[in-house]
């Protein structure tokens, strides 16, 4: 893995918090910040992917006209989570 140097200026209060958190985690402040940046970058990428998938699903629903009523889906999911038998909800057709 190639390493790129970067300079990061932190407010003194945040620097102190990072140092304390890193020490409590048994890490160097550098390792702690690298891990935090990696975690936040992965979260942002997942958010972007989720938004892309939601947009694609919306486009598909608009094209097909089929959807599932939220109440039906919630009832199904709750019953399944509680270990109860449940029939899968039937898709509905939107009015065009």
Image (cartoon, rainbow, N blue to C red):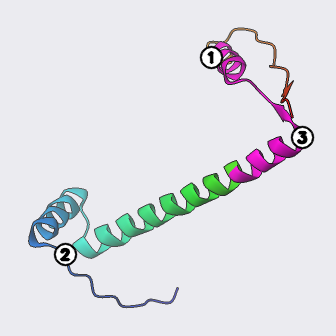
- Whole-number angstrom distance, CA of label 3 to CA of label 1: 27 Å
Q: Secondary structure at mark 1?
A: helix
Mark 3 or 1 closer to N-term? 3
Q: Residues within 10 Å of mark 3 (few under 14, many from 20)?
A: few
94 vs 3, nearest the viewer: 94
The picture places residue 88, in percent across and down from the top left corner, at: 81, 19
- Whole-number angstrom distance, CA of label 1 to CA of label 2: 46 Å
18 vs 46, nearest the viewer: 46
The picture places residue 79, in percent across and down from the top left corner, at: 66, 12
Residue 9 numbered tag: none
- Image position of 5 with respect to 81: above or below: below
Q: Secondary structure at mark 3?
A: helix
Foreground disc of the pair 3, 1: 3
* Residue at (74% x, 45% y) in the render: 58
Per the image, the residue denoted by label 1 is: 78
Corner quadrant of residue 73: top right
The picture places residue 95, in percent across and down from the top left corner, at: 85, 29
Mark 3 or 2 closer to N-term? 2
Per the image, the residue denoted by label 3 is: 64
Q: Secondary structure at mark 2?
A: loop
Corner quadrant of residue 15: bottom left
Per the image, the residue denoted by label 2 is: 10
Residue, far top:
84
What's the magenta region? 55-79
* Count of picture labels: 3
């Amino acid at each position: 893995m190639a390493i790129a140097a970067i300079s990061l200026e932190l407010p003194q209060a945040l620097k102190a918090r990072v140092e304390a958190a890193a020490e409590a985690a048994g890490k160097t402040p550098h390792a702690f910040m690298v891990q935090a940046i990696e975690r936040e970058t992965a979260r942002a990428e997942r958010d972007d992917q989720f938004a892309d998938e939601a947009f694609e699903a919306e486009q598909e629903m608009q094209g097909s006209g089929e959807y599932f009523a939220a109440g039906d889906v919630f009832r199904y999911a709750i019953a399944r989570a509680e270990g109860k038998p449940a029939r899968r909800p039937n898709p509905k057709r939107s009015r065009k």
